[in-house]
Image: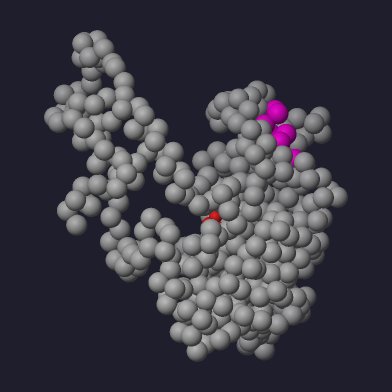
Amino acid sequence: MKNYDKLIFEVSKPGRKGYELPAAKLEADGLKGIPADLLRKKAPELPEVSELDVVRHYTNLSNKNFGVDTGFYPLGSCTMKYNPKINEELAAMPEFAALHPAQDEESLQGALELYYNLQKALSNIAGLAEFTLNPYAGAHGELTGLMVMRQYHKSRGDHKRTKVIVPDTAHGTNPASAMVAGLEVVEVKSKPNGSIDVEDLKPLLDDTVAGIMMTNPNTVGMFETDIVEIADLVHKAGGLLYYDGANLNPMLGKVRPGDMGFDIMHINLHKTFSTPHGGGGPGSGPVGVAAHLVDLLPNPRVVKDADGKFHIQTNDKSLGSISSFLGNFGVMMKAYAYILSLGKENIRLVGPMATLNANYIKENLKDDFLLPIEGACKHEFVFDGLKDKSTGVTTLNVAKRLLDYGFHSPTIYFPLLFHEALMIEPTETESKETLDEFIEVMHKVAKEARENPEVVKGAPHTTPISHPDETTAAKKPILSYKAMKQA
Ligand SMILES: *Cc1c(COP(=O)(O)O)cnc(C)c1O
């Protein structure tokens, strides 16, 4: 094993250092005033390494990592698209990044203007009256939106409405957020083509229904053509419609949730609007509402007065606060820069390009992969594994074999509608050449599955770790050097 394939703890040599600190001075001044019971009795067990060891360690670790910046990442329901680097630079401008949230309004006018303009831009994109940018993530936006829903019924004295209808294909955060919001989840079935079964929905719509949570295109990437009828049925029954807009790519510039009849929605800025997604944040899940719900949005909000000044405002009818201050400002800056740099004309191309890319892959691979839902998809689609089921090669095997060819795996075994689900979302930022390479490799894997299935079943063959025991890895992950030595 090369030195740089080892853990940093294994490279450690007693006494080796990458720095020099004046020890005497530290002891004399540094520890003064710190209570004795807060001081360590024993030095921390840190690796003892040189600066070069540390540089190589992190550089080599970063090379083992896979990201959108290193290769194609067709992860369904995740929108792993390329985010222009200039937006990162803008978000890091010290004039914004060094602001303190407790500064007075007068000294924050520029930041508040950006915040206000982004609220307006998202309202236009979504076809809704107002947005709050306070929530920190998609799931947080869902919770906030459902609190708006609950508050709406409560404010009208309609206390019976405690149920939220969620399709059986929904993203896992939907039912989870409904539970956290204190609402009861009722499942509505999907038809074989993945869209909501209106006949199954009708009997669920009584006076205990607070609303329905949906996404359109739905989780299998198909447009819900019955949406106008569904909106009508839910509204007539006294409920509200919630739109999960985490992956807004397919709709961007083409269709607006507000026009489809939705009353409340969230958007993941860290998927659709130029913040990389994954790794635990930072994120932002703005929530938009129709005109009759604006007063219920969380406090505080940013408003503009008649003189063009911006204010941070709270209002009594609001459902309360769901964040400290106004949310993740850096993420908003990237979204604002992204929207302005695309402009009205180019933002209209996002949805069509995402849709074209997904359909191009789907149509080119359906000879080798089983396509359970025919027809034009939007930004993503689902295969039910390989078409030839006689080889014994599973979706998991295919996904792992792709790693050997330098591609990230698609989403697998989700949604639960199909046993061998393989969900592909290329996004709008990939070129035809990249899509062609991916198609070629997928065909190659299908051929291997027929001619030499053991190669695919044994994959990956080229990654640092190939076959962890997945259950143990998930349930008892070894996350420290000490734990590794004990295991
Ligand atoms: C990613 C995603 C969410 C959750 O967003 P987080 O920011 O991870 O909480 C919700 N719904 C859908 C459809 C998603 O793809």
Say left or right for 370 vs 346.
left
Residue 63 location (% of width, % of height)? 47, 45
Image quarter in which the C terminus is found: bottom left
**Foreground pick, 74 / 348:** 74
Instruction: Give the quadrant of residue 288.
Output: bottom right
Say left or right for 11 vs 280.
left
Residue 371 location (% of width, % of height)? 64, 81
Residue 313 visible, this angle: no
Residue 145 location (% of width, % of height)? 60, 59
Instruction: Give the quadrant of residue 218.
Output: bottom right
**Foreground pick, 69 / 125:** 69
Q: Which residues are magenta?
A: 109-117
Rendered residue at 31%/67% (across/down): 469
Rendered residue at 40%/72% (across/down): 458
Rendered residue at 64%/33% (across/down): 89
Q: Is residue 100 above or below residue 298?
A: above
Judge whether residue 110 is colored magenta.
yes
Q: Residue furthest right?
A: 345
Residue 32 location (% of width, % of height)? 23, 15
Quarter of the rendered image showing ligand 1: bottom right
Magenta region's main secondary structure?
Answer: helix
Judge whether residue 208 is colored magenta.
no
